[in-house]
Amino acid sequence: SSSSSSSSGRSTQSSNESQLQQSRRAMLQRALLASTAALVATPSAQAQEKETSTMILSNSEIQKAVKADVLDRQFLVTGNLTPSIYRPTATFTDEIDTYGMDQWQKGTARLFVGDRSEVRLVGDVEVSPQQVEFRFDEDLMFRIPFRPTVSLTGKVVLERDEQGYITSYREFWDQDVWSVLKTAKF
């Protein structure tokens, strides 16, 4: 009987240890599942937070910035634009070629004498959710020997993405390149 009670005690002890192991295992599994769920949920939660916290540029914000770029900063001759309204991958196309934003800004600043050139806005800056458009009339002094100045008119079309950022700049001249060059004054 003492051997059966000792056997029974071992079996109870063994049963208790087994339950404790199962309980620990279940607790570890729950902790592991919770951790995994948190890890999996975190990126999407961060992405969702980022998406909702991303500033969406309104039509009036874009219009105000572009108008200041044209009139105050004379960006068509200085390259000095408001970079925060453009996607870093935005392309800039004129009558000659297509450039990245940094290349266009540097090239424009090097090509023209900004304080001796003048850009005039013809009409207003027209804005829709898809694009921004404005007409210009400009006198461009080139940063080359004899400092020739040419005059031209045209329009700029800025394409926008779904968040309102500008993704492309396209310049259209009313005259062809050779006609513009013929207007050169020295």
Image (tube, helix red, strand yellow):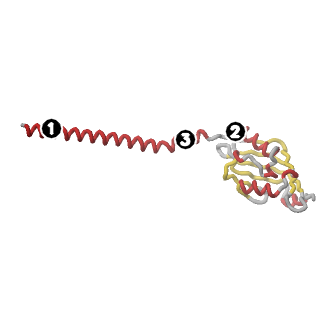
Query: Residue 142, percent across and down?
Result: 86, 58
Residue shown at the point (69%, 52%) measured from the top left: 90
The dot on residue 9 is: 1
* Crowd rating for badge 3 (residues with CA inside 10 Å; few <14, some 14–19, many 20+): few
Whichever of callouts 2 and 3 sits on the residue coming sooner in the sequence is 3
Q: Distance of mark 1 from mark 2, alpha carbons?
A: 77 Å
**Which residue is pictured at 58% across the width and 42% down the height?**
50
Point out residue 143 in the picture as x, y percentages from the top left corner.
85, 58
Residue 144: give x, y in percent of width and height: 86, 61
Mark 3 falls on what kind of element? Answer: helix
CA separation, marks 2 and 3? 21 Å
Helix, strand or loop at mark 2: loop
Residue holding disc 3 = 48
**Residue furthest left in the image:** 1
The earlier-in-sequence mark between 1 and 3 is 1
Q: Nearer the viewer, residue 134 or 29?
A: 29
Disc 2 marks which residue?
Answer: 58
Label 1 vs label 2, nearer the camera: 1
Question: Looking at the picture, which amino acid does disc 3 mark?
Answer: Gln
